[in-house]
Image: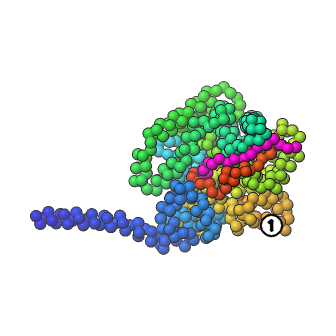
Amino acid sequence: MDALVGQFSLTGGALLVAILVILVRPLILSIYNLVGHPLSPLPGRKTWAASRVPFLWALIRGKLVHEIEDMHRRFGPIVRVAPDEVAYAHPDAWNDILQAKAGYLPFPKDPTWWAPMPGAAPGLVTGVDHDLHALVRRQLSPGFTSRALATQEGTVHQYVDLLVERWREAVSSGQGEAEVDVMRWFNYMTFDILGDLAFAESFECLQRSEYHGWISLIFDNLKFNGAMISARFYPMVDSILAMLIPASLVKAQKAHAQLIVDKVRRRLDSTSQRLDFISTIQTNIQDTDYKNDKGLPLDVVHATFSELTIAGSETTAMALSAALNLLIHHVDEREVLVREIRGHFGSYEEITVQSVRDMVYMNAVLNEVLRLCPPVPWMPPRKVPDRGRMVCGRWLPGGTRVSITFTSMHREPTSFHAPSSFCPERWLPEATDNPDSPFHNDKRHAVQPFTLGPHSCIGQNLAWAEMRIALAKVLWSFDIAAPEDEKKWVVWESLRTFLLIEKKPIAVVLKPRAD
């Protein structure tokens, strides 16, 4: 009996110790994070510095970008947003984090955030291996050059013209005006363009006036994927969440992954000689080791083209939607832009990649749109290399996560005059040349919507061409206005952000041009 009692006491004691460890350890760790951690001198909210939980809770609710921007406004351009993470709104962070320097590579991507989901292959975006990324980009880059764009311009015009045609039909059937959701329609256009240039097959969104099923799945997955990535910080939660994925969602994901496989295979088997995204890799595909100078594994190709279709279309559509949303509420700026477009072109057909490239006010408007409404709101963290590095004049220990919130960087009061106001004139030559301009000292280099360095957006030439051509052709063809019902107005800053910006209808009233 005494032995049994002793054994029970020992077991009970061990259980008590285990419970105390479970309860006390987080408290001790939080105290250490606040007072003993190397990042503890940095400003920020104490609750966020103590635990990763507030950061992840904000992400899951779609409020992360807004919360970090609030912290930057309260504490400055460098803030601690988690026990091991620092967020930057200082323009020097772009070069310090993303640019290669003598003897140093750019900071590596944090696999917690960037790595693909379990069972998925890495691609151009989700690949965290530097050599793999360099190989994929090297193989793809000929399809994204200025020479390639010259051959792809006809495809861009084809779908922009179809968009304009659909809107003209809507105006005709609406007795002289029509209210359209430009977010939806620009998405149709950009997905069709990317489908054609990537696979030589349009998704036929504009033809059908509806989203393709695969595209709808992308939007539905954004919130869920954010939660899945957040769970990686807590392996037990990650395992439980993985078991809770609905079977129907898994089935749909597999079906649509197969759709990309089929589209890639048809394009690879094609004898077409046109210069598009996939033509340059047709003879450089292998199935095994990728660490050489020739060849990409087929699963990496599939992952890359799935990513390109999303990233290359979603961001451009978001920027164009933001542009019209701003212009319908800023009459003076809209009138200046419309005068420039209609005064520059004698006919609709004169609008080309070359003819819109140097339009001063249009470029100013688009730069200001990208400053205020960056299509990608947040750059997920990179990691400081093991030996530690300097960022914005401060030494950070190896393993520290560093991130940039585009909206915070682009609206930093120490970088811009009237940082939250829509002022295209800040981008005009006279703002730079005239010391008396209120925008003379703006740090325009802080605005990097396509990021910098070897991981910068490979498709930015195409994105600029699409934005300029679409905006010019729409404003050449239509007068635009805000709907009378103010409940339909969208305040961009109120949109939630997950891995991308939440989609909400943006209503714009179209009328045939008055002159």
Q: What x and y, as percent, mark residue 349?
A: 84, 36
Q: Which residues are magenta?
A: 500-515
Task: Answer above or below: position of 197 versus 316.
Answer: above
Q: Mark 1 packing: few (<14 Cα in 10 Å), some, or many (20+)?
A: some
The quadrant where residue 181 appears: top right
Residue 266 percent coordinates (x, y): 60, 28
Q: What is the image's colouring?
A: rainbow
Q: Secondary structure at mark 1?
A: loop
Residue 327 visible within the image: yes
Residue closest to the eye, 474 or 311: 474
309 to the left or right of 119: right
User: Would you say residue 511 sits in the magenta stretch?
Assistant: yes
Q: Is residue 367 above or below residue 198?
A: below
Is 3 situated above or below 172?
below
- Describe residue 363's horizontal placement relative to residue 117 as left or right: right
Predominant secondary structure in magenta? loop
Q: Residue at x 71, y 62 (%)?
A: 420
Residue that lies at the very extreme toward the left in this rendered image: 1
**Image quarter (top left, top right, bottom left or bottom right) of the N terminus:** bottom left
In the picture of the structure, the residue carrying the numbered disc 1 is 438
Q: For the point 52% across and 64% down, which residue is it? A: 82
Whole-percent x and y of residue 481?
76, 49
Indicate the quadrant where residue 407 lies.
Answer: bottom right
Q: Residue shown at 41%/45% (left/top)? A: 243
Residue 158, picture quadrant: top right
Q: Nearer the viewer, residue 363 or 214?
A: 214
Left or right relative to 7: residue 187: right
